[in-house]
């Protein structure tokens, strides 16, 4: 197979093995538009197949050390999960209409079930990811998941959000440390301080923008009063748009910082995942993707998705010691339910 | 056929071996670089649907696999296997069918938005039992947004007005309330409940004007407009969850924008329906629809004045509402809000007056 450039980093005695992304927007557009059309025509049934095809396209175009990744989930398993998720959503919303108490009780039950859904989703996704014929896996238990996904989140709530970065840290530890490739476990070297730094940067950026916005509006108010206008005009309208854009940019900044932290701190048996994502470039890519998708009423989506993944992967590499020695573990079939529940309720799981 | 070039993985180690795969009549032969051969029964072979640009995994037995990037080669191989390429592969292969798929998707989505969802919601809305409608109204009536307080209108006047309005049309719940947040206004909260504010009762100079407003709100209730709106919103939610299940992230954020725009367009269509209904009922009762036109004009003046007030005293009454709705703090809220959900007043009064003398 094709061999990628493998250079040796003399300082660490490891070879630098980059990720290479081969996908392009035009190819993905073909797949995406067929997914969309068939999903509409089948009233949503095809969405399970669409999901597999999408993941397959992105995994299949991701190359590491000459070999591609693959996603091998069964669409039927995903369909079952989706049907259960839709049924639960329907019950939940109907119950809410009948009685707010019943809706509250059901909502609470669902909330208590989040760790269960998360574990099932992580397990399903890992088990269906494959590289060089060896499957990934996730073997965190549900009981263990209640610590980060319930107790630590509760702690974040009790501390009025001050404990939230630490909760994120615990969640990340749980997610990464229970993943494995074949028999080799991965582990995270990220620290709690790293997550606090992210929070500090984002909160700081938010307040800085807010103060700047306030100052501009104040000066504008002074000026327009001096001239004798009544405060209604072009600037207030456009400044709301700019403020919203900055707000979105900060959310994207958070995503970029988070990616940078998590994917600089994963190790699998002396093989280290590293990236040098530029915050500015990545946020600008996401922001222009958002605007272009908006302007084209969604048609740009395939190009946007490819552009984002290509940037991430072209700045992601492994300081590899040995990528040939991994061995597989007896794998079992995991039902798709968890993952689809997670998606329907938008938990945004994923490493 | 010619051999497919690729990599063989035994499924237990991450070290692959370069090799080739050739097809015989009943079996496939994988030859790896060291010269050893593996023979696989054709019925055992599983080929995943190939996607352009991505490798195809051919698997058999206990996790063994042969991975190749030879897309065309796999297509040839596929013809000799049961199943073969599916519809998706056929459509995405040619530019012409891709263009057709794009046009068809756009048409279907537009059709669903313009016709499908509203028609479905209209049909379903009438099957909602009265208890649920009542429950919906109870939830809205206590909402902090509306800031509804008990009425300050003299109880005798309330009783008289209630008797007058209900003598034309009965509704399970007719509420008179005061509200600083929404000023002179009337609301249909669901099929069971209509609310009229003190300010509106004071703004109206005759009971006929109030009857016109009541008929308009009763029209909303009778035609199940609130129920339809809720159903439309949930239909979109379910639809978007299913269709965009694969988009993720910013894509989802983006797709909610047309929905909210769509919902406000729907609400204008409902206002026209309710106006039309009210005019019909007024004519039926032998009352001139002119009353409706005059109260609408008074309402617009009222909200225009409220907007200017909130410009001057931005610290006061409208603050709660404007905070919640993320106003820029430069006022204009009351009027803008009113205009957003209703068709232009001039258009409405012109329509109403055109029906004063029925054709």
Image (spheres, helix red, strand yellow):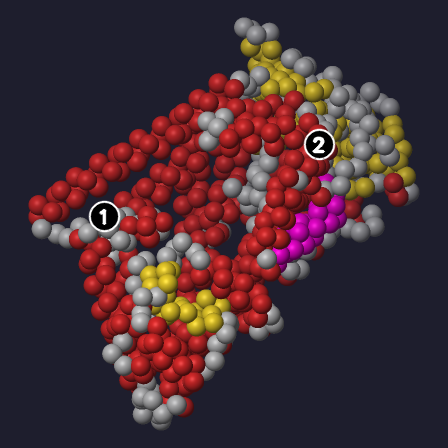
Image: A176 above or below B346: above
- Outermost residue, left side: A227
Q: Which residue is mark 1?
A: B315
Q: How many marks?
A: 2
- At horizontal 36% and vertical 28% (from top left) the residue drawn is A204
- At horizontal 73% and vertical 49% (from top left) the residue drawn is A80
Query: Could you say which is closer to the camera, residue B37 or residue A95?
Result: A95
Q: Is residue B271 visible?
A: yes
The chain to which mark 2 is attached is A
Q: Position of residue A117 (x, y in %)?
A: 67, 39
Same subunit: marks 2 and 1: no
Query: Could you say which is closer to the camera, residue B300 or residue B95?
Result: B300
Q: Position of residue A220 (x, y in %)?
A: 17, 43
Residue A89 inside the magenta-drawn segment = yes
Most common SS among magenta residues: helix
- At horizontal 31% and vertical 88% (from top left) the residue drawn is B288
How packed mark 1 is, by other alpha carbons closer than 10 Å (few <14, some 14-19, many 20 or more), is few
The chain to which mark 1 is attached is B
Please give the range of residues in magenta.
A73-95
**Direction from residue A96 to residue A248 in the image, left or right:** left
Distance CA(mark 2)–CA(mark 1): 52 Å
């Amino acid at each position: 197979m094709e061999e990628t450039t493998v250079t040796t980093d003399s300082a660490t005695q490891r070879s630098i093995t980059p990720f290479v992304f081969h996908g392009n927007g035009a190819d993905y557009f073909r797949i995406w538009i067929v997914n969309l059309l068939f999903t509409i025509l089948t009233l949503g049934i095809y969405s399970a197949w669409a999901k597999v095809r999408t993941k397959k396209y992105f995994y299949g175009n991701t190359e590491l050390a000459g070999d591609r990744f693959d996603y091998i989930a069964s669409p039927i398993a995903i369909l079952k999960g989706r049907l259960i998720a839709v049924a639960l959503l329907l019950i939940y919303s109907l119950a809410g209409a009948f009685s707010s108490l019943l809706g509250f009780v059901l909502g609470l039950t669902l909330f208590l079930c989040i760790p269960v859904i998360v574990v099932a989703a992580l397990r399903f996704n890992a088990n269906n990811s494959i590289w060089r014929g060896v499957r990934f896996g996730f073997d965190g238990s549900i009981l263990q998941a209640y610590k980060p996904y319930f107790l630590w989140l509760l702690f974040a709530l009790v501390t009025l959000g001050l404990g939230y970065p630490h909760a994120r840290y615990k969640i990340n530890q749980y997610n990464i440390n229970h993943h494995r490739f074949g028999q080799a476990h991965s582990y995270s070297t990220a620290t709690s301080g790293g997550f606090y730094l992210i929070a500090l940067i984002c909160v700081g950026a938010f307040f800085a923008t807010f103060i700047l916005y306030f100052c501009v509006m104040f000066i504008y108010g002074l000026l327009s009063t001096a001239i004798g206008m009544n405060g209604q005009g072009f600037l207030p309208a456009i400044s709301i748009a700019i403020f919203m854009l900055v707000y979105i940019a900060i959310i994207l900044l958070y995503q970029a910082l988070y990616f940078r932290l998590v994917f600089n701190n994963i190790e699998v048996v002396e093989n280290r995942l590293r990236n040098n994502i530029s915050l500015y470039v990545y946020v600008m890519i996401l922001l222009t993707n958002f605007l272009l998708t908006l302007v084209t009423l969604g048609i740009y989506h395939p190009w946007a998705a490819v552009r984002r993944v290509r940037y991430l992967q072209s700045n992601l590499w492994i300081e590899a010691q040995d990528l040939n020695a991994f061995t597989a573990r007896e794998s079992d079939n995991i039902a798709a339910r968890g993952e689809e529940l997670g998606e329907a309720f938008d938990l945004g799981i994923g490493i | 056929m010619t051999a497919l070039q690729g990599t063989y993985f035994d499924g237990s180690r991450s070290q692959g071996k370069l090799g080739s795969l050739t097809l015989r009549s009943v079996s496939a032969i994988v030859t790896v670089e060291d010269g050893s051969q593996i023979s696989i029964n054709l019925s055992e072979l599983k080929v995943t649907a190939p996607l352009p640009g991505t490798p195809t995994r051919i698997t058999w037995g206990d996790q063994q696999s042969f991975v190749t990037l030879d897309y065309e080669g796999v297509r040839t191989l596929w013809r000799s296997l049961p199943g073969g390429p599916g519809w998706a592969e056929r459509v995405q292969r040619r530019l012409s069918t891709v263009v057709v798929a794009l046009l068809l998707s756009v048409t279907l989505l537009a059709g669903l938005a313009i016709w499908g969802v509203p028609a479905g919601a209209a049909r379903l809305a009438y099957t909602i039992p009265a208890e649920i409608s009542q429950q919906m109204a109870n939830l809205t009536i206590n909402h902090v947004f509306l800031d509804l307080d008990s009425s300050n209108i003299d109880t005798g006047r309330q009783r008289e007005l209630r008797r007058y309005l209900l003598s034309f049309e009965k509704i399970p719940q007719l509420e008179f309330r005061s509200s600083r947040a929404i000023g002179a206004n009337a609301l249909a909260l669901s099929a069971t409940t209509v609310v009229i504010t003190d300010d509106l009762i004071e703004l109206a100079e005759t009971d006929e004007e109030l009857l016109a407003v009541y008929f308009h709100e009763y029209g909303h209730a009778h035609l199940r407009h609130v129920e339809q709106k809720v159903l439309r919103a949930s239909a979109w939610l379910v639809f978007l969850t299913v269709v965009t299940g694969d988009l993720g992230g910013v894509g989802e954020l983006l797709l909610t924008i047309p929905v909210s725009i769509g919902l406000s367009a729907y609400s204008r269509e409902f206002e026209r329906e309710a106006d039309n209904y009210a005019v019909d009922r007024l004519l039926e009762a032998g009352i001139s629809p002119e009353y409706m036109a005059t109260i609408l004009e008074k309402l617009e003046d009222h909200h225009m004045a409220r907007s200017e007030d909130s410009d001057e005293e931005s610290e006061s009454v409208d603050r709660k509402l404007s905070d919640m709705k993320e106003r820029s703090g430069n006022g204009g809220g009351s009027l803008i809000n009113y205009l957003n959900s209703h068709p232009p007043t001039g258009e409405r009064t012109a329509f109403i007056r055109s029906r004063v003398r029925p054709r």
